[in-house]
Amino acid sequence: MNLLADFVAEVIFIFIPVNYWYQTARKQTFMPKLFLGLDSSTQSLSAVVIDLDTRKVVYEKSLNFDRALPHYKTRNGVLPSRDPLVKHSSPLMWAEALDLIFAEMKKDGVALGKILAVSGSGQQHGSVYFNERITAALGNLDPKKSLVENLRGVFARKTSPVWMDSSTTVECAEIRKKLGGIKYTASRTGSDAFERFTGPQIRKFCKTEPGAYTKTSSIALVSSFLASLLAGKIAPIDYGDGAGMNLMDIRNKVWDMDALKATAPSLKKKLPPLAASGHVIGPVSAYFVNKYGLNPEALATTWTGDNPASVIGLGLIKPGHFAVSLGTSDTFFGSVQKCQTDEDGEGHVFGSPAGGYMSLVCFKNGSPAREKIRELYGIAGWKQFGELLQQTPPGNDGGILLPWFEAEIAPRVNQPGIHRFDLDAKDAGANCRAIFEAQMMSMRLHSQWMNVSPEKIYATGGAADNAELLQIMADVMNCRVSRIEVSKSAALGAALLAAHGWLAAGDKNPKWEKLVAGFTAPVPDSEIRPNPKAVRIYDKLLEKYADCEREAL
Ligand code: XUL
């Protein structure tokens, strides 16, 4: 009898560890390493799933808010407003979109049960305001209900101001004054006080709705709001998106108490902690496990802003690698070695998810302005737009158009309007050329503070498909331009952030350059070189362009 018991014990003793080892090894050998990245942008929510072993994007999907969720009545993702400077959106719409995209992924057969970690990015600066019910709601998300139903009664403010809002000029001036002027505000928080930045927006809310501000127990960014839903608890704000608030001490990556004081009372209590992008918060909420079949061991990580995520998604890991993103906003950004802020206060320094910093300049009149000109001149499509560019000379014979259809960020324009100089308003071709030349000259002019001369610029975003536009970019910026065919650079960056977080949590010490390899190569043979003759024309025209800006302002 004893012998039998010993034998059984022996078998158990050997079998359990061997079986455990076998299962773990099996998991490691056969489990694909899938990571999910989400990007909640101005107009859509996108999902990208990557397989880290095969270095492939295995799934991509986008939901356009206006079309997929028409009951929120947004236009291009923004709620209608009588005041053209006020641009808000609905946090419930973003939450409903999250449910919808998970349902789509499930329907499309995405192996949600095999995803190891989730991260994401959001349009920068937008803010979400909760009352004290939020913690319990997040901790008890009921899978039998939708996220919208689960979030009923948790908001201290129904709508969220977004990055397109320009209604806080007074609050910017107040904060800037308290912090000691443009230069000091920028060197302290990474940027001068900007209308769309979260601090001035919080100040306006506190001044105009003091009762609702008092009832606000917690404030989130778009990114940290959605991360909170995934994690089932209030998520930290990361150093990339946190730097877009005028509230974070950019050098020490902690909340800046003077900036907080200059903004609104009791603000520290209402803000979550700061953390690195992709930092592991914990396992994903049971809501997503029970409802959509997400792996219960999948990790929820901190999200970041869409621009910081694009730094990763475009592979701009080494300092000096820069990109131009031609989207709803046009941005010029890249990794930099040190934190050098703009003394004139037009540009921004954010924390880079790859560590260190990124510099960025943002133009509000991006693709919507190009589209307006196309519509104004009845041009059917971008192909025809490109043909018109070919028929017009670089420099446009000195014709200049300032395309400020909306209030502009760089340079600061509070009174929208378009201005023509030596340009015939009836000439369709000249106006098409003028708008993109102006956008590129403005980019060159307002990024001089960065003091960078990139070897090459990577172009991305919808309009980057147009070779004629990229030639103008190369000639104005006097730099080689290559197209990166990553349609969802922010969502891809987010998926890579999830992978980084998962590897780091497993003590794997992942290296960014290795991690992004294979995902972010430029399109072969897409390089466009500057034409020396055109470069000389733009070098000269830039002076006239700067004079026109000064005159219009
Ligand atoms: C950056 C900015 C925009 C938004 C767009 O400062 O305001 O690029 O992030 O989503």
Image (cartoon, rainbow, N blue to C red):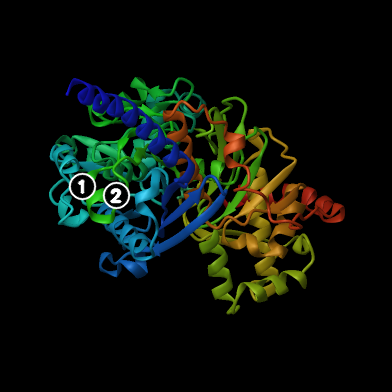
Residue drawn at the location 77% of the way across and 53% of the way down? 475
Q: Is residue 129 left or right of residue 339?
A: left
44 up-or-down from 17: above or below: below
Amino acid residing under circle 2? Ser
Q: Which residue is mark 1?
A: 157
Residue drawn at the location 40% of the way across and 59% of the way down? 44
Amino acid residing under circle 1? Arg
Residue 479 horizontal/vertical position (percent) = 76, 47
The Cα–Cα distance between marks 2 and 1, rounded to whole angstroms, is 7 Å
Q: Are marks 2 and 1 in contact (CB under 8 Å)?
A: yes
Residue 179 sits in which quadrant?
Answer: top left
Q: Is residue 37 left or right of residue 532?
A: left
* Residue placed most toward the observer, 311 or 66: 311
* Residue placed most toward the observer, 45 or 479: 45
Q: Secondary structure at mark 1?
A: loop
85 up-or-down from 52: above or below: below
* Residue placed most toward the observer, 113 or 408: 113
Q: Is residue 101 left or right of residue 290?
A: right
Q: Which residue is mark 2?
A: 160
